[in-house]
Image (cartoon, grey):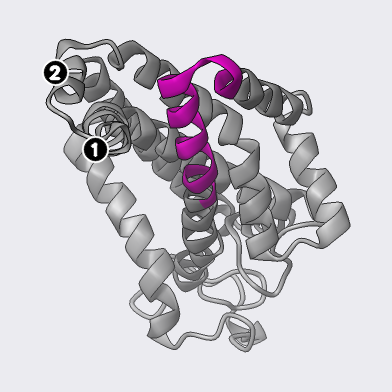
Amino acid sequence: MSRYLASAVVLLVLAAGILGPLTGYDPVADVHIADANVGPGAAHWLGTDHLGRDVFMRALLAARWFVLPGGLACAIAAVVGVPAGAIAGWYGGPFEAAMRFGFTVIASVPRFVLILLTLSIYGDAPHVLAAAAGLSFVPLLGEAVRARIEELRSAEYVLASLAHGLSPMRILAYHLVWAGARHAIARQLFGLFGYFVVLETTLSYIGGFGVQQPEPSWGNMLVFGWADDNVLSAWTPVLLLVATVGSIGRVAEMFAERADG
């Protein structure tokens, strides 16, 4: 997939998640049994589902359940994982040992199991799901940052900066984390965002957790589309999910190429 096409798809999905609610469309109240399973047309671009609800608008509004929570998950992972990994990579020794011990404890529980346990205890509100997903990715992000900082801390420009009297914290924050590790961080965060899209869709598809009908989610749209043999209602969330996750993965690869370069 072209990097430009992938970037455009990601931007469109982000815009849908942020601006979709501003359309004024009410996915709960929009039930018109007389218009059930209508094909695509000017009034309904992708037709209607088994309750006469607009498939296009429901798919558009469904993005809000993973865009903002997914962004929150990335923010939580970054706030915890980046400083921990940077300090461990810069100082090493007991700092690195403590970080690795903490990350090992978190990573010892499979990520999906850890998230389900958190939801079972604290509820499945979007911010709880975001916190659970973000914290579950901290070991992966922290280790990536630690490895990058450890690789760069002996570089000539770092030693020269120390010799010229720059503070270690300034060197670490700007010259190493920002200038040297930002592409690696972005790659990991895009990976987390793609995982969150799949996670939210999966939970809504399985039921019990996640977004429940009548609120639209790509997961529950898929369930009801298959159950009612409505091809467009079923395949729309599938194609959107594949395009979104594939595009996010391609954008993450772009940052990986820059980091390696």
Image height of 177 relative to 10, above or below: above
Q: In this image, 66 relative to 187: left or right?
A: right
Q: Where is residue 239 in the image (x, y as percent from the top left)?
A: 46, 45
Quarter of image, res 133: top right
Image height of 61 relative to 101, above or below: below
Identity of the residue drawn at 54% across and 43% down? 80
Whether residue 222 is visible here, answered yes or no, is: no
* Of labels 2 and 1, the one closer to you: 2
Q: In this image, 162 relative to 231: left or right?
A: left
Specify the amino acid type for callout 2. Answer: Ala
Mark drawn on residue 12: none
Identity of the residue drawn at 36% across and 21% down? 149
Quarter of image, res 216: bottom right
Residue with the most extreme right position: 121
Q: Mark 2 points at which residue?
A: 160
Quarter of image, res 179: top left
